[in-house]
Image (cartoon, helix red, strand yellow):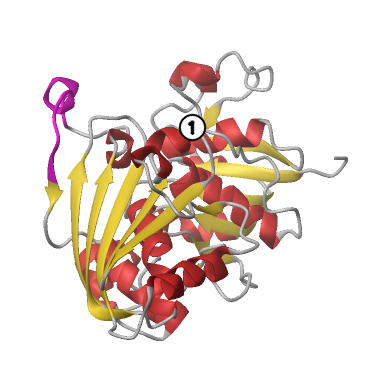
């Protein structure tokens, strides 16, 4: 395309930033023209992300300090939590649109913000956007994308809550790969390898986000027990949600609700009538892609909903590019992978 979107990745040295760069390098309507990293300023992108060094478009890309940002159409915020609020005024002077992938601006309740994202108190308000669930495409300049475990949980639970099919008490078990902790995560590979452990049984900051989003999208506020676990894999999130259906609800009602919720949504694929274990959502079917797989199993009044995503693509960089496409009137799937990478 003749007039490509000029794009900046603010905080490009982490896993999410690197994934954004990878996807943008092959995006037919966007061009990464600025990559920031205070620590790696002046360094070629391939030296920081070796998996990008053989791309023909990466050779001339170097990291720079965020203060040197020039005029761009879109700035993606991929900074650690708490950093973007301080840089936001200068970025807004130079970017027409800010799409933030970190958590700083996801919550609206002041008490929850103080508890989880205190650096964003007093900052401009961002619109929270989930492409498949938000009622409209944002019209403002400031947009925050959902958290990876939060959005996987939303995909699993939304049809049950939107259809008023389940009792208000739910249990959600979310399991995530090691890249969910960021590139600076402190856990040694020797301790994670061959292990499976609890991450947070209570108090994860994605819980108020899930509750807030469900209330916004459905009008209901379910009571959710949300616990997270660490998987011995680099990428991927598998969420299992447990609900008790209302007395009059049938398995067919549930099946229809999931079909209705995601019809016409190209990146949420409902696995209908799963029988064998491999029929259910799984990491091998989504890792490397911008696809979320969803399925639900019903026995009597018990419903078990499952969702699987790649935390770096559908849970972060891919969803951000999907939002960029929609906000600029492009096909939402432009430049986004639909097939997984395996084995």
Q: Position of residue 41 (x, y in %)?
A: 47, 28
- The quadrant where residue 104 appears: bottom left
Kindly tell me whether residue 12 is visible in this rendering: no
In the picture, the quarter occupied by the C terminus is top left
Q: Which residue occupies 60% across, 13% down?
A: 54
Secondary structure type for disc 1: helix
Q: Which residue occupies 61% across, 64% down?
A: 263
Q: In this view, does 296 lie above or below 293?
A: below
Decide which of 69, 201 is in the foreground and name it.
201
Q: Where is residue 222 in the image (x, y as percent from the top left)?
A: 27, 79
Q: Which residue occupies 64% across, 52% down?
A: 74
- The quadrant where residue 85 appears: bottom left
Residue extending farthest to the right is: 2
189 part of magenta stretch: yes
170 part of magenta stretch: no
**On the rendered structure, is 334 left or right of 337?**
right
According to the image, label 1 marks what residue?
Answer: 18
- The magenta span reads 187-198
Q: Position of residue 200 (x, y in %)?
A: 14, 52
């Amino acid at each position: 395309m003749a007039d490509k979107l000029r794009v900046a990745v603010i905080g490009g040295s982490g896993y999410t930033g690197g994934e954004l760069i990878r996807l943008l390098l092959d995006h037919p309507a966007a061009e990464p023209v600025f990559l920031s990293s205070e620590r790696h300023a002046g360094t070629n992108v391939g030296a920081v992300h070796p998996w990008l060094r053989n791309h023909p478009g990466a050779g001339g890309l170097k990291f720079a300090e965020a203060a040197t940002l020039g005029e761009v159409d879109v700035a993606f915020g991929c900074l650690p939590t708490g950093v973007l609020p301080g840089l936001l005024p200068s970025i807004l002077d130079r970017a027409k649109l800010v799409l933030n992938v970190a958590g700083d601006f996801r919550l609206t309740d002041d008490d929850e913000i103080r508890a989880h994202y205190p650096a964003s108190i007093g900052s401009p308000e961002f619109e929270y956007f989930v492409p498949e669930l938000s009622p409209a495409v944002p019209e403002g300049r400031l947009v925050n994308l959902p958290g990876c475990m939060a959005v996987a949980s939303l995909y699993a639970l939304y049809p049950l809550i939107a259809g008023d099919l389940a009792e208000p008490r739910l249990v959600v078990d979310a399991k995530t790969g090691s890249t969910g902790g960021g590139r600076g995560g402190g856990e040694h590979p020797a301790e994670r390898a061959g292990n499976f452990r609890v991450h947070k049984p209570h108090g994860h900051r994605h819980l108020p986000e899930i509750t807030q989003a469900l209330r916004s999208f459905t009008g209901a506020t379910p009571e959710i027990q949300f616990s997270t676990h660490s998987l011995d894999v680099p990428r991927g999130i598998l969420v299992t949600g447990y609900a008790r259906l209302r007395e009059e609800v049938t398995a067919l009602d549930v099946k229809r609700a999931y079909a209705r919720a995601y019809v016409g949504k190209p990146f949420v694929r409902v696995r209908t009538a799963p029988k064998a274990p491999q029929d259910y959502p799984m990491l091998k079917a989504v890792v490397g892609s911008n696809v979320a797989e969803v399925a639900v199993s019903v026995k009597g009044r018990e419903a078990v909903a499952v969702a699987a995503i790649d935390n770096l693509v559908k849970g972060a960089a891919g969803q951000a590019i999907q939002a960029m496409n929609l906000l600029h009137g492009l096909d939402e799937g432009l430049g986004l992978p639909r097939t997984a990478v395996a084995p």
